[in-house]
Image: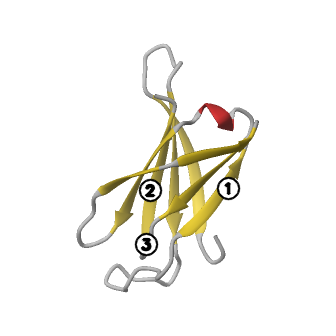
Amino acid sequence: PSGVRSQVFQRSTSRSGADQNLLICLVQPGVMLADEPRSTSTKITLEFTGAEVYNQAVWQSVSRTPRQVPLRVTVSSENSLEVTLPPFGAAGILRLSTQ
């Protein structure tokens, strides 16, 4: 999203490496932890080879009361998926998984 910086990390969740998680860290520079969250949800589109195998998403916002929120993953094409994030403040982590 506009004004948001991100980094993507890949993590194996099994010894064989067959199951993978993608961790996407999202940060809004200049937004403080005590600031109110965005007033609207944010749809993000991720495009990469193999995107269609990720079928679960969990969002955890960095806030005074952090909690994990399951999200719906929509596969829009072979190498593309969409997730709608709830309103968030300074930062959060989106975890996509294959299981």
| Residue 81 x, y percent position in the rendering | 66, 46
Residue reaching furthest top?
16
> What residue is disc 3 on?
88
Task: Please say if 41 is above or below 76.
Answer: below
Horizontal arrangement in the rendering, residue 83 relative to residue 38 (left or right): right
Label 1 neighbour load within 10 Å: few <14, some 14-19, many 20+: few
* Residue for point 70% across, 32% down: 50
Disc 1 residue type (three-letter)? Thr
Count of marks placed on residues = 3
Q: Earlier in the sequence, mark 1 or mark 3?
A: 1
**Of 89 and 7, the residue lying toward us:** 89
User: How far across and how far down the image is residue 11, in percent?
Assistant: 49, 34
Amino acid on which the number 2 mark rests in the picture: Ile
* 80 versus 3 height, above or below: above
Q: Are marks 2 and 3 in contact (CB under 8 Å)?
A: no
Query: Which residue bears the numbered disc 2?
Result: 93
25 left or right of 82 in image: left
What's the amino acid at mark 3? Phe
Front-most of residues 40 and 20 = 40
Judging by the rendered image, the residue that carries numbered circle 1 is: 45
Callout 3 secondary element: loop
